[in-house]
């Protein structure tokens, strides 16, 4: 296991998450580490943000919603109407307030790992994409998408956003403005108009 100093966080996740979600968290940490290695990112910080990204995922919805309201992380009205998105904002709040992690990029990576935003930092992009290509992911075209991620992170962001917007809109879900801003921002990197 990488980074012995993060063992306390792994133990905390084992207590807070189901076995499946814990395994996913470790896999996202590894995928984030790999993407950082390929793209000159800070491997340790990417690993930690990937590890903690779903720390609030299985908490009671009422607590997630309260943390969103108290977070100061500017949740979009569309996020507040989408309970499946609350854990990301709540997670950013939790790591800042409870774990005393003050690294704004780690907080941002956790906060935006579900919806993205325009002009993300390298660390934020890595965790967003790492979550989509972790070893436990098995959706159609995931292997194709992994290759895109390994080749070009900005193009991968565009492809990911096209995929996510199509998936959410096909279920008549709300699209946060952050996601639409991200789509418009990263589209210029997708010159061959690739999608999944």
Image: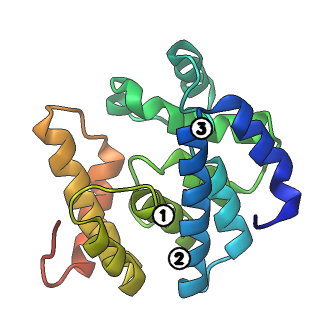
Q: CA distance from mark 2 to mark 1?
A: 7 Å
Give the class, few, some or many, for how many residues have Cα within 10 Å of label 2's Cα (few <14, many ≥20).
many
SS for callout 2: helix
> Where 114 falls versus 129 (above or below)?
above
SS at badge 1: helix
Disc 2, disc 1: CB below 8 Å?
yes
Q: Residue at x 38, y 56 (%)?
A: 137
Disc 3 marks which residue? 19
Left or right: 130, with 157 as reference point:
right
Q: Which residue is mark 2?
A: 35
Q: What is the residue that sits farthest to the front in this orientation?
A: 19
Q: Which residue is mark 1?
A: 130
Tell me how far mark 1 sits from mark 3, CA to CA: 19 Å
In the rendered image, the vertical position of residue 29 relative to residue 74, given as above or below: below
Residue 67, image x and y in percent?
A: 61, 24
Q: Are marks 1 and 3 in contact (CB under 8 Å)?
A: no
């Amino acid at each position: 296991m990488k980074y012995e100093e993060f063992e306390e966080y792994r133990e905390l996740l084992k207590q807070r998450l189901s076995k499946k979600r814990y395994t996913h968290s470790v896999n996202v940490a590894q995928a984030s580490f790999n993407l950082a290695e390929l793209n000159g990112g800070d491997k340790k910080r990417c690993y930690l943000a990937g590890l903690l990204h779903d720390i609030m995922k299985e908490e009671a919805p009422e607590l997630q919603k309260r943390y969103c309201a108290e977070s100061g992380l500017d949740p979009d009205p569309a996020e507040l109407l989408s309970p499946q998105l609350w854990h990301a904002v709540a997670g950013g709040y939790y790591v800042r307030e409870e774990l005393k992690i003050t690294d704004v990029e780690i907080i941002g990576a956790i906060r935006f790992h579900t919806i993205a935003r325009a002009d993300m930092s390298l660390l934020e992009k890595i965790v967003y994409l790492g979550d989509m290509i972790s070893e436990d992911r098995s959706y159609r075209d995931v292997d194709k998408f992994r290759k895109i991620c390994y080749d070009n992170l900005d193009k991968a962001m565009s492809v990911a956003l096209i995929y996510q917007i199509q998936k959410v809109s096909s279920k008549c879900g709300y699209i946060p403005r952050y996601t639409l801003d991200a789509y418009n921002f990263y589209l210029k990197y997708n010159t061959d108009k690739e999608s999944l």
